[in-house]
Each structure stands twice: as structure tokens, then as C-alpha cells.
Image (cartoon, rainbow, N blue to C red):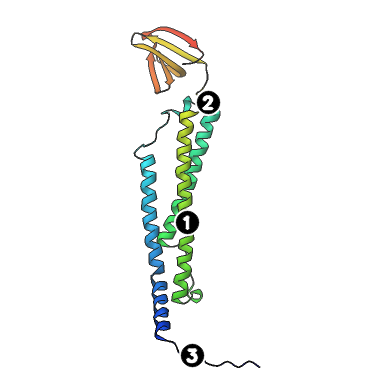
Amino acid sequence: MIRLRPGPPATVADLRQAQALAGLLRAELDRVRSAALAWRNGLGALLLALVGFSLIRGRTDVGTLAPNWAALVGALLLAALVTGAVGALALLCAAHGRLAVTPVAALPPPPTGDHQEAVAAVRALRTGVGLVLLCAALLVAAVGVTWYGPPRTGPFVQVGTGAGAVCGTVTATAAGTLTIRTATGPVQVPLTDATTVKAVPAC
């Protein structure tokens, strides 16, 4: 038969350790929220530098790429958009909490509930950081494809004018004006200024 007996009384060191642990549990959620805010601001600045300030730049017109490579750029940009949006939502969840209401009857005691919320916030923070970094990698990959992807192959039209030659693909004709898509963007050439018009295999 097993009999339970009271243990030795708590020492001063035991009491201080218990107080320190309780203090850590009370401040744990605030520390995680502060870290999530810092990560959110830092990663937002990174994406802003990549996109808003154009620190990386590829072709100005994706239409000059070969069709399959242009589709790949579109897929990479779509994947970057999705991962960036999900990562941003995860970071917001880590910084400000989930969009959910817990019934009063299901609320755990304060130390336990705060710890569970901190664990969920850390999990959301890790997910958000990983997804935002993946978004940045996809953006860099998309720009890399625009740099090194093969250009669209003919047929091309080279129109000679008094100011020089314009080479590209004809996208529209209206009112005696040719709209030619070149490597630097669309160019409108009046037919009255054209001196030569010929098909070429490449520009």
C-alpha cells in the first residue's frame, strides 16, 4: 500500500525559481508579439526594396520572351503573390492574434492560455517568415528568367525610317500607323515615314 506524505518545505531558491518561471510565462506572449512585429516590418521592407524600388530589373516587356518562358515567368509571379499573401497573413496572425473567439467556458487558466497562445504565435511566425522568404526567392527567380530566358523567335518586321530602323513584331495597325512591339516597348511608326519594310528572322 502506497501512502502519500507531504514533501519537504520549499526553500527560498525554490520560491524564487517559481516566481521567475511565472514572470517568464506572463511576459512570454508579449515577447513573441514584439518579435513578430519586428519580423513583419523587416520582411516588409525587404519586399518593398525588391518590388517598389526596383533593385532588381529584368526585361521591360515579358512578351519579348519565348512563349513557354513567358508562361514560366507568369507562374513564378503568381506563386510569389500567393506565398507572399499567405505569409503576410501568418505574420499578422503572429503579431496580433487569430481572428477567432474562444467561448468563455473553454478558456484555460491565464498562464496556460497565454503559453498556448505564445506557442501558436511562434508557429505562425515561423510559417510567415518561411513563406515571405520563399516569395522573395520566387520574385528573384522570375526576374532571372526575364534576364536569361530565350527571346521570342520570328517573324519580325524591320521598318526603316529617316530616324533609324525599328524592329519587332507588329501588334496593331490603325490610321496608317504600325504599332511594333520591340525589346524596349511598343513603338508607333507612321507608314508615311517608312522607307523600307522587310521581314527578318531576328532583331
- Relative vertical location of residue 119 with respect to residue 66 in this rendering, above or below: below
Mark with earlier residue (2, 3): 3
Q: Nearer the viewer, residue 134 or 166?
A: 134
Mark 2 to mark 3 CA distance (whole Å): 79 Å
Q: Nearer the viewer, mark 1 or mark 3?
A: 3
* Viewer can see residue 86: no
Q: Locate residue 12: give its quadrant.
A: bottom left
**Gap in angstroms between the C-alphas marked 2 and 1:** 38 Å
Residue 181 visible in this rendered orientation of the protein? yes
Of residue 116 and residue 15, the one placed in the foreground of this image is 15
Residue 142 is situated, as x and y percent measured from the top left of the image, at 47, 36
Tell me if residue 182 comes above or below residue 197 in the rendering.
below
Q: Amino acid at mark 2?
A: Ala
Above or below 131: residue 194: above
Disc ID at residue 66: 2
- Which residue was labeled with disc 3? 8
The residue drawn where x is 49% and y is 15% is: 202
Residue placed at 52% from the left, 20% from the top?
Answer: 153
Residue underneath mark 1: 126
Task: Tell me the element at label 2.
Answer: loop
| For discs 2 and 1, the disc positioned in front in the rendered view | 1
- For marks 1 and 3 on the same chain, the one whose residue lies earlier in the sequence: 3
Secondary structure at badge 1 equals helix
Disc 1 marks which amino acid?
A: Arg
- How dense is the environment of label 2, judged by Cα within 10 Å: few (below 14), some, or many (20 and up)? some
- In the rendered view, would you say 4 is above or below 81? below
Q: Measuring from the top left, give residue 30's x and y in whole percent.
A: 38, 66
Image quarter (top left, top right, bottom left or bottom right) of the N terminus:
bottom right
- Residue drawn at 55 percent across, 93 percent down: 5
